[in-house]
Amino acid sequence: MPGEREAHGAGPVSPGDPQGRRVLLLHGLWMPRACMAWHARRLRRAGFRPELFGYDTVGGGPARAVPELVEALCEPADIVAHSLGGLIAVRALEREPDLPVGRVVCLGTPLRGSAAATGIAQLPVLRRFLGRSAGLLRRGCLAWEGDAELGMVAGDSGRGLGRFFGNFEGPSDGTVAIAETRVPGLADHIVLPTSHSGMLLSRSVSRQIIAFLRTGRFDHGQATPAVP
């Protein structure tokens, strides 16, 4: 259900200390909130307080999801968001720049706009499957200028249906090109050997999420070299 959230764990949040901090996890297009449960479990084991944030990606889109997320962020939190979820998070923070969000980790989010979504939107039979999220997916954002530290995990294992619809520039995770994940203003960017959907189960991705939430930087010693 839109705006429905599931808490994992409890306990006070120490100001200025990411350990024990509340973390909202947002899923991507066509996905249920449960798809973020793997990362939620690993975050809880690492001492954070994850919550799964669900929203209607097609019927509701950003017009509904953004206000619901703003409401959920009335208390201090960090954000971990996959694909479209990252665009929803960025849009919420652009609309309400004073929200108490310290760090945001995007997983395969096409911040520069999605070529795959643009290709799908040009096909009458398929465009309806993008629903009310089509515009945001196609436009993305030009740059990140908010106060929150924004980190991006991209993948270079090009397995996914998106490659059949998007004319990708260089390597991709099969749905989103690495070039589409880069915008000015990112605190850090890392490329891992994973596909777009594989990010949801990857232990390496979980480790990088935790590293960024704790320090504001990824652990590049465990990553593949970033593509310029």
Image (cartoon, rainbow, N blue to C red):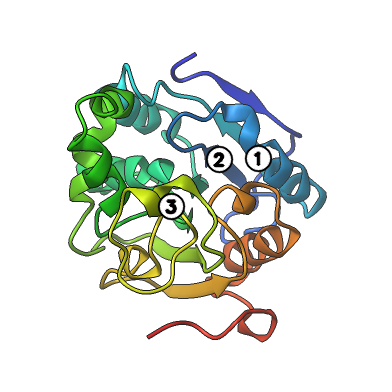
Residue contact at pointers 3 and 1, CB within 8 angstroms? no
Q: Where does label 3 land, which residue?
A: 175
From mark 2 to mark 1, how far is it between C-alphas?
Answer: 7 Å
Instruction: Using residue 61 as the reference point, say whether residue 142 is left or right of it.
Output: left
Q: Where does label 1 land, which residue?
A: 50
Circle number at residue 146: none
Q: Within 10 angstroms of label 1, few (less than 14), some, or many (20 or more) residues?
A: many
Q: Position of residue 49 (x, y in %)?
A: 68, 41
Instruction: Using residue 174 as the reference point, say whether residue 18 is left or right of it.
Output: right
Examine the rendered structure and indicate whether residue 60 appears above or below residue 30.
above
Amino acid on which the number 3 mark rests in the picture: Thr
For numbered disc 2, what is the local secondary structure? strand
Comes first in the chain, label 2 or label 3: 2
- Give the quarter of the image for residue 183: bottom left
Examine the rendered structure and indicate whether residue 78 appears above or below residue 173.
above
For numbered disc 1, what is the local secondary structure? strand
Residue contact at pointers 2 and 1, CB within 8 angstroms? yes
Q: Where does label 2 land, which residue?
A: 25
Comes first in the chain, label 3 or label 1: 1
